[in-house]
Every structure is written in structure tokens, then in C-alpha cells.
Image (cartoon, grey):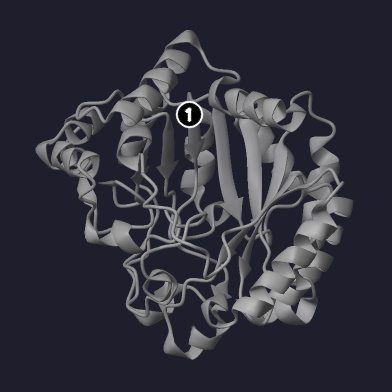
Amino acid sequence: MAMKKKRVSEKLRYLFEGASVKRALNTARSILAGRFGAERPPPPWRLQIEVTNRCNLDCVFCSRHEHDLQLGDLSPELFDRIVELSASVQEVALFGYGEPLVSKAFFELLPRLKSSRITFFTNGMLFDGAMFHRVAELSGGRFAYVVFSIDGGTAETFERIRRRASFDTVWKNLREVAAARDSLPRRVGIHMEFVAMRSNVRELPALLEMAEAAGVDVVKVSHLVVWDEDLRDESLCYHRELGDTAFAAAAKAAAGVRLRLELPKSFGEAQRGDPPCRMPWNYAMVSFEGDVRVCCFAPELTMGSLKDNTFREIWHSDSYRALRRNMNENRYPAPCGACEERYRLAASPDEEQTYVKLKPRKK
């Protein structure tokens, strides 16, 4: 019971901490609109802005290897519309399909945002203690948490997966960030994302020990999504016993420590029904080109461009309203039927199709 109350308290703090009356009301209305399936909801309470899709690494599992990708940064001509929208948004996540810290747009947009919270993902190569202080200062005290992407407990495994990265550099930077955040009046969360696959999942328990010692607050584990035939055998979809054993060992390592471990479902679990998705009510993504997308996992679900229309016009457009209406009637578009995030905690209709896609996702 105490643990349940703690999680409820954390959820409420996540949704409303630091919010103005306007943002708090919008967040509540956004959540209720999603719960009741309103076709014309208020602005989303969470916004993801892709400041760039350029990256300083060459990770083996990235789908950008499989197709030509137009690279670019968010144009300053879009800043005003994003800033205006951020006034009603509880959280803005400044990242997309690249490393946000390589982009000037990240640093130019950061101090202008009006949301209660600002977050981003990083591969850790550029985010040291000095950079932490810079981001904290530019955000005006609204920097909520950062997510380090780390997929190995040893240098050999990590550097094989995240090519061009240095294991020692990333961990040095993470420790500097943990030390730097202790000097701030408002605690900034340090999270970690781990992509589980055949060749690294055994290292997860050791990685958790390192993360706990370094001051990481949350470690989220996700299953590998395969875009390349050469990586098919890396999916735990084909190594279920290995995955189950490693996840059990990780849960044991995380028991009784401060760090919170978030594991995905195990493959082969019984179907528990199709989980609902509230993305079209609670969230929107803006790509660096200015496209407004329903979800970062389905770029084909692009509803319009901020270069052509206001966000409100797009958010209440016929296409968005039709999508919400169809989802209310459990008629989901094709990408949702094999969405790795939607089925993160529930068995999908076809687990192989969900995690072994092979056809690259346009980014």
C-alpha cells in the first residue's frame, strides 16, 4: 500500500509539479480528453521537439543505416510557434532521432520555452558536468531529467553497439552530471535507457550496480527493434529463456536499492488484450522539418506542417479527428498494431512482427 501511494504521489508530481494554473488545467483537461476520447481535445500536455536528426554516433541498431536520410536542424522560423505552444504544455522533450547537443537549435530554443519541465535524451559523449550547468542555467530551473542511452556493462560490448562512443568518457560524464546536479536546489533526475539484446542482456545486472553507484535514478529496459537482417538473431524474441533469466537477475540486483528498474514484458506472455493508446490526445511530436506527428514511433502518421498551419489548426484538423474517432472504435492504423511502445508491457498480436520489422522506419 505504501509503495502504491508513493507511485501515485510521483505520478501527480510528474504531471503537475511547477505548473502554472493554466498548464495544470490544460494537463488535467488533456488527460480527461484522452480518457473519454474527445475528438477536439485541448493542447497536449506533453510535446516532443526534434531539434535535429544529426548524430555523432553510428549505433548498430539504428534504422538510418537502411535508407538515405535527409539530415537537418530545426529552423529558427519555427521557434515562435513552438514557444507559444509550450506555454500550455507541462513537459517539452527536446530530442528526436539524433543527438540534441550537436545542434545550435537546442541551445537557442531551450531558454525560450515556457513549459514547466524540460527533458532530453543523450548518448552521453557531450554531456559532462560543465554542459549540465549550461543546460540547467539556460532552462531557468525547469530542467527535469536527462536520459543517458547506455547499452552495455563493459567497454567491449558498449563500444561495439554504440560505434564512435567511448565507454569511459560516457561514464565519466555521467558521474560528473550526478555530482553537478547535487549543487542545484531542484533535483534533476538522471535516467538510463538500455536496449536489451542477445549479446548484452547478461551484462544488465552489472550495469545496474554501476548505475546505482553513479547516482542514476531510473533504468528503463526496452527490447531491441530489428531493422537489419544481420541483427535478427540479436532479438530476445528468439532467445526467450536467456531474456527471462537475465531480467530475473536484474530484478534481483535492483531489489532493495534506491534505483528504480523498469523492465519490459517477457516474450511469450499470455495476451492481456490490446492496450489503449492516448498519444493523439496527450502528446505530439514536431520533427526538425516542422511536421506534426501523432507519434515518434510512426512518422507516417504526419498530420500537417507548422510551416503551413498553426498547431491548433493541425490538432483539430479532419485527419486528426478521424484518427481519434477510429481509435475510439478500436480501429487503429497499421503502425499501431505492431508498435513496440504500445505493447511494451503487454503481449502483442505478433511479437515477431512488432520487434523484427526489417523494413526501415523513415526518420
What residue is shown at x 64% (from left), y 50% (from top)?
147
Question: Residue 330, image x and y in percent?
Answer: 24, 46
Determine which quarter of the picture holds residue 71.
bottom left
Residue closer to the observer: 279 or 170: 279
Placement of 192 over or under 91, stated as above or below: below
The number of numbered discs placed on residues in the rendered structure image is 1
Instruction: Inspect the image, locate mark 1, and give the three-letter code of the amino acid beneath it.
Output: Leu
What residue is shown at x 42% (from left), y 28% (from top)?
45
In this view, the residue farthest toward the bottom is 230
Residue 303 appears in view:
yes
Q: Which residue is mark 1?
A: 113
Sort mark 1 into few (<14), some (14-19) or many (20+) by Cα contacts within 10 Å. Answer: many
What residue is shown at x 38% (from left), y 34% (from top)?
282
Residue closer to the observer: 2 or 336: 2
Secondary structure at badge 1 equals loop
| Location of the N terminus (image quadrant) | top right
Determine which quarter of the picture holds residue 244.
bottom right
Question: Residue 149, image x and y in percent?
Answer: 64, 60
In this view, the residue farthest toward the top is 21
What residue is shown at x 55% (from left), y 57% (from top)?
102
